[in-house]
Amino acid sequence: MVGIPEAFARSTVEREGDPGAAWLAELPGIVDELLARWGCVPDGEVMHGGVGVVVPVRRRGDEVDAVLKVSFPHPGNVHEPDAFAAWGGRGAVRLYEREDERFAMLLERVQASTLAEVEDGDEVVTVAGRINRRLAVPAPPGLPRLRERAGSWEEQLRKDAEELPHTLPRHVVDAAVATVRELGSVQPDVLIHGDLHPRNILRAHREPWLAVDPKGHAGDPAYDGGTLLKSRALALLEADDLRKALHRTLDVFAEAAELDRERTRRWAQFHAVQAAFWGRRHGFRIARGGPRLDWLVEFADRLSELLMEPS
Ligand SMILES: Nc1ncnc2c1ncn2[C@@H]1O[C@H](COP(=O)(O)OP(=O)(O)O)[C@@H](O)[C@H]1O
Ligand SMILES: [Mg+2]
């Protein structure tokens, strides 16, 4: 029986409460059952992310290294295998088997090293941009369409601006609302990763880098540019000139992803305003309260303003 990492068990119970504890109690049995069904044996330390355990395995009979990923049964994890299936190994790891009832997949195993370990910021953003481009294929039916969320995004922005104490200038909030109205409601049926950040891009052999952990949304590929930029924001702090570093990141990403720069900037500005309000309402995973949260919220405010400028 494989052991479930302690930190993963703790964070699952903290986030999900009793249903989390109940699922954890079943998890070793689920893993054993799937290993047996798919003819696999464990082959290394169990890894994990925020929502799933990842067990390195070998499949008897062939020489293929794989991983078994079992996620907490949450609606946000339903479309992960659909996205992998649509990509067919292009830009993302291959899907070998799926058991949707268990939120489980057998995936191609790649290296444990992630793009987050690369120090050169331009390289990180270039690789992420190329992956974004590669993943932009026609979306299969049945995936959540982001354009259908535009209405609730706009409503939330208005509600937050009204209810929360904040110092964001009116025109900065209005710009985010305009983005949702003008870009949000007309998004194409393109498959996008949905959680594109450097820790979800792993080093590989078949291709230099491959994506894991997609949400599997259909929408504007430039939307994920905003997701990526948000994940880069803290790295930009070390820059002497934040404005310059931010706009350079946008230039490099848009070029590598073959996306319209202005569209990418507008989505990034929207993500920054959303984060500024989210932080005030819920805190962030890396700071739930106190001076560190205040500081992060102020930083999101600053990004929201700096991203107003076309370049
Ligand atoms: N196909 C894979 N090959 C090798 N390691 C993987 C693979 N998929 C995931 N991992 C490892 O497990 C970690 C968590 O996986 P991820 O799919 O991102 O889970 P979560 O949904 O919980 O974030 C990754 O950061 C990586 O270290
Ligand atoms: Mg992940």
Image (spheres, helix red, strand yellow):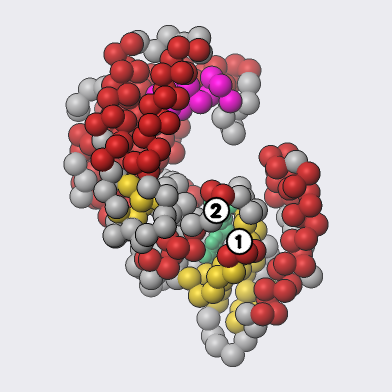
On screen, residue 24 versus residue 252, left or right, reads: right
Element type at mark 2? helix
Q: Nearer the viewer, residue 104 or 6?
A: 104
Q: Which residue corresponds to the image point at 36% horizontal and 61% vertical from the top-left? A: 140
Report the amino acid beneath label 2: Asn
Horizontal and vertical percent for residue 282?
Answer: 58, 25
Badge 1 or badge 2: first in the primary sequence: 2
Horizontal and vertical percent for residue 35?
Answer: 68, 76
Q: CB of mark 1 within 8 Å of CB of mark 2?
A: yes
Q: Nearer the viewer, residue 68 or 81?
A: 81
Report the amino acid beneath label 1: Phe
| Vertical arrangement, residue 14 with respect to residue 50, above or below | above
Quadrant (top left, top right, bottom left, bottom right) of the C terminus: top left
Horizontal and vertical percent for residue 255?
Answer: 21, 46
| Ligand 1 contact, mark 2 (Cβ < 8 Å) | yes
Q: Where residue 203 is drawn, which disc sits there?
A: none
Q: Which residue corresponds to the image point at 28% horizontal and 21% vertical from the top-left? A: 175
The residue at which mark 2 appears reads as: 77
| Vertical arrangement, residue 206 with respect to residue 48, above or below | below
The magenta segment is 273-282
State yes or no: residue 73 in magenta: no
| Vertical arrangement, residue 171 with respect to residue 217, above or below | above
On screen, residue 1 versus residue 239, left or right, reads: right
Q: CA distance from mark 1 to mark 2?
A: 7 Å
Horizontal and vertical percent for residue 97?
Answer: 54, 74
- The kind of secondary structure the magenta stretch mainly shows is helix
Circle 2 Cα neighbour tier, 10 Å, few/some/many (<14 / 14–19 / ≥20): some
Q: Is residue 123 visible?
A: no
Quadrant (top left, top right, bottom left, bottom right) of the N terminus: bottom right
The residue at which mark 1 appears reads as: 103
Q: Is residue 280 visible?
A: yes
| Ligand 1 contact, mark 1 (Cβ < 8 Å) | no
